[in-house]
Image: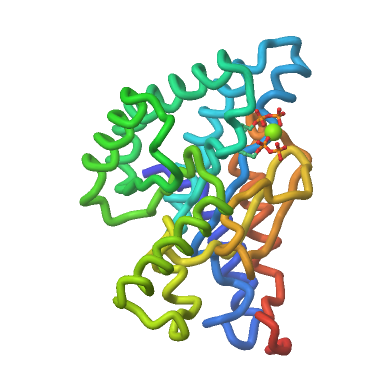
């Protein structure tokens, strides 16, 4: 059987671990949850004199590559920012193409998702998405629901502020109806009403195409995520880039407001 490419990174991290006094919680740890702001599709196409949609098409190939690589590495969850609630400001033609691409991806990806035992979920607002896209998404989620491998979460028509507002509304309603005590509201109660309820927070946040901003992505959940930004455009992002991000993550000292353990 061919050695999976992921094994090189694992070996490298293992070697680091043996040099670490406390390997159990040392820098050898893989991120449990990686979240990616997949940016730069338009620029990739523009650099080649192609229409922006060609960048999105190539972007899907990167999604495929990275999903497979993460699953083989043993990453617990991969969350991909596919469409923000602010992306509706784009031209109608580009949006239509993105919806079509998502629908197609959802159908074509089924064999890989099943083979790699990946389960799928979606965060974001369903309103405004075409019925055919939702149908393909729902069917894939259902088909993969028994998979016990990596969890792939797609952020589609997602906006973190809207997500937090809707959680706040739910808490307000529950308090008004006497189900909860307003003074007892804590972080866990708010987190339980976010789209990401039940998911671990991202450990590593990757953004491609060099922008140093979070663009309304998982604002609550990334409080203590380690960030890694690359100039590479999303269609050029490959397994080696991901390994570089993970290696950087593995060397970070995550203090969570406390003091260094070493
Ligand atoms: C990211 O690429 C994909 C989506 C936001 C859907 P962009 O389309 O934002 O690419 P740039 O930033 O214009 O290069
Ligand atoms: C963020 O990228 C959204 C997605 C990757 C889906 P954008 O390209 O929309 O972000 P801005 O507009 O540069 O902040
Ligand atoms: Mg962009």
Residue at 50% across, 18% down: 96
Query: The N terminus is located in which quarter?
Result: top left
Query: The C terminus is located in which quarter?
Result: bottom right
Q: Which residue is at the front of the view, 93 or 1?
A: 93
Q: Is residue 122 above or below residue 100?
A: below
Task: Please provide percent x and percent y for residue 133.
Answer: 36, 27
Residue at 47% across, 85% down: 183
Task: Please provide percent x and percent y for residue 64.
Answer: 47, 34
Residue at 33% across, 31% down: 134
Task: Please provide percent x and percent y for residue 61.
Answer: 52, 28
Is residue 26 shown left or right of residue 198? right
Is residue 25 shown left or right of residue 244? left
Q: Which residue is at the front of the view, 186 or 33?
A: 186
Q: Is residue 157 among the parts visible in the rendering?
A: yes
Q: Which residue is at the front of the view, 198 or 189?
A: 189
Is residue 118 shown left or right of residue 186? left
Task: Please provide percent x and percent y for residue 104.
Answer: 39, 22
């Amino acid at each position: 059987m061919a050695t999976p490419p992921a094994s090189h990174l694992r070996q490298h991290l293992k070697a680091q671990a043996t040099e670490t006094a406390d390997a159990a919680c040392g820098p050898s740890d893989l991120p449990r949850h990686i979240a990616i702001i997949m940016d730069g599709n338009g620029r990739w196409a523009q650099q080649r004199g192609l229409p922006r949609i060609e960048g999105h098409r190539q972007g899907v190939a990167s999604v495929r590559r990275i999903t497979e690589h993460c699953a083989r590495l043993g990453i617990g969850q991969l969350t991909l920012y596919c469409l923000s609630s602010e992306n509706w400001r784009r031209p109608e033609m580009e949006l239509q193409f993105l919806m079509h691409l998502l629908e197609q991806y959802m159908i074509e990806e089924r064999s890989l998702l099943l083979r790699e035992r990946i389960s799928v979920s979606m965060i974001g607002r369903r309103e405004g998405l075409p019925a055919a896209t939702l149908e393909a998404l729902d069917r894939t989620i259902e088909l993969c629901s028994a998979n016990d491998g990596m969890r792939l979460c797609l952020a589609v028509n997602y906006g973190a502020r809207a997500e937090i507002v809707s959680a706040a509304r739910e808490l307000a309603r529950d308090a008004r109806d006497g189900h909860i005590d307003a003074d007892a509201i804590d972080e866990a109660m708010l987190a339980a009403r976010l789209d990401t309820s039940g998911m671990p927070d991202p450990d590593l946040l990757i953004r491609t195409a060099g922008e140093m901003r979070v663009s309304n992505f998982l604002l609550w959940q990334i409080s203590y995520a380690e960030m890694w930004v690359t100039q590479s455009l999303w269609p050029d992002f490959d397994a080696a880039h991901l390994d570089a991000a993970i290696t950087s993550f593995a060397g970070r000292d995550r203090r969570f407001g406390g003091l260094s353990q070493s």
